[in-house]
Image (cartoon, rainbow, N blue to C red):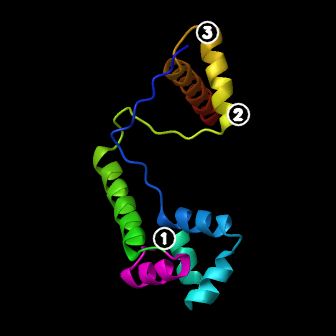
Amino acid sequence: MNLKIVASDIPIAIPPGETILAELEARGQSLQDLTNCIGLAPGQVQAVVSGDSEVTPELASLLAEFFGTSVAIWTNLEQQYQAALHAKKIVGANGKIALRLPKSLHERVIDLAEAEGVSMNHCLLSIVAEGVARYELRRSR
């Protein structure tokens, strides 16, 4: 079966904090290492990592120095994240969804779709519809 990947019209909102954590992990460092080095309270950095607080120009400068990157990288990540959040609020429920699956689950869905002779989209739609119906039935009891 040939699968066609279609990009969503809605950008995926990835908080800059995910990039911070990924960079720390790649370098074998912890969030505590970062906060100790840049001189901010752990709560301030944790708020950014969790998406509850924005990357300010001051923090972007500190992150750039710590990671050896440009300030623009961090400010751009924040701007892209905010734009994606804004786009999601404007678009609302339009029938399109971006879904990340673990590789093993993705492979199982592909196998199911092939076995049924349907597209992966149709297969996922059927599974979600059945799951929602079961969930609503359980809640109504």
Label drawn at residue 104: 2
Residue highlighted by disc 3: 116
Q: Which mark is residue 36?
A: none
| Marks 2 and 3, how far apart at CA | 19 Å
Residue displayed at 61% across by 81% down: 34
* Residue at image coords 54%, 81%: 66
> Callout 1, which amino acid?
Asp
Q: Label 1 to label 3, Cα distance in Å? A: 43 Å
Q: What amino acid does circle 2 point to?
A: Ser
Magenta region, residue range: 53-68
Mark 1 or 3, closer to the camera: 3
Q: Circle 3 — which element? A: helix
What's the residue type where badge 3 is placed?
Answer: Glu
**Residue at far left of view:** 90
Residue drawn at 35 percent across, 49 percent down: 88
First in residue order: circle 1 vs circle 2: 1
Callout 2: SS: helix
Across and down, in percent, residue 118 comes to 54, 11
In the drawing, does residue 9 fall left or right of residue 116? left
Q: Are marks 2 and 3 in contact (CB under 8 Å)?
A: no
Q: Which residue is mark 1?
A: 52
Element marked by disc 1: loop
Locate the C terminus and report the quarter of the image it occupies.
top right
Lower position in the chain sequence, tag 2 or tag 3: 2
| Front one among 100 and 138 | 100
Residue 99 rendering spot, x and y as whole percentages: 52, 39
Give the residue drawn at x 49%, y 82%.
Answer: 65
In front of the other: label 2 or label 3? 2
| Image x and y of residue 73, in percent | 41, 68
The residue lying furthest to the top in this view is 117
Is residue 50 visible to the viewer in this orientation of the structure?
Answer: no
Q: Is residue 4 magenta?
A: no
